[in-house]
Amino acid sequence: MRHIALFALALLVSTSAFAAGTCFYGRTVNSFQVTGRDTMKVRDGGRLYQVRMNFCPSLRWADRIAFDSFSSWVCRGDKVLILDMRGRVQDRCWIDEITRTR
C-alpha cells in the first residue's frame, strides 16, 4: 500500500509540473550550456529552457549530461545526471525549476 501511495504522489508531482508547462521532452535535447553554478540552458529542438538545480557542484565541469525522470518528459523534481567521458554518473542533481526562455 505504501508503494502505491508513493507512486501516486510521484505521478501527481510529475503531472502537475507538466500541466504548468515547465517540462521538456528529454529525448530531443540536442545541446546544453552551463550558465552558472547551479543553472544551465537546454535546447529541445527549437525551444530553449533555463534549468535550475537545487545544488549541483559538478555542473560547472560537465561535458555530458543525462536525465533521470518519471517519464520521457523532464520536469521539476527530476534529476540531471552529470556524466564523465565514459558515461559513468559523477553526480545527481535535483531539478528545482524549469523556465522556457524562447
Image: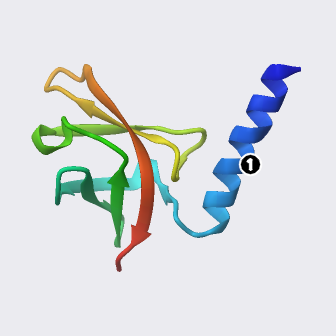
Looking at the picture, the colour scheme in use is: rainbow
| Quadrant position of the C terminus in the picture | bottom left
Q: Residue at x 18, y 35 (%)?
A: 58
Which is more toward the observer, 82 or 85? 82
> Which residue is drawn at the image coordinates 79% and 38% (left, top)?
8
x and y, in percent, of residue 73 in the image: 54, 51
Residue occupied by mark 1: 12
Residue at the far left: name it.
61
Residue 36: x percent and y percent? 17, 57
At a point 16% along the width and 39% down the height, the residue shown is: 62
Seen in the picture, residue 16 relative to 62 is either above or below; the reply is below
The N terminus sits in image quarter: top right
* Image side of residue 44 versus residue 58, left or right: right
Q: Outermost residue, front direction?
A: 55
Indicate left or right for 72 with 34 as reference: right
Location of residue 20 (image quadrant)? bottom right
Secondary structure of residue under mark 1? helix
Give the image quarter of residue 55: top left
Percent x, y for residue 94? 42, 41
What is the x, y in percent for residue 19?
A: 67, 66
Total count of labels: 1
Q: Residue furthest bottom?
A: 102
Q: Residues within 10 Å of mark 1 (few under 14, many from 20)?
A: few
Judge left or right: residue 31 versus residue 1: left
Kind of residue at disc 1: Leu
For image coordinates 20% across by 37% down, the residue present is 57
Give whichever of 53, 49 is nearer the camera: 53
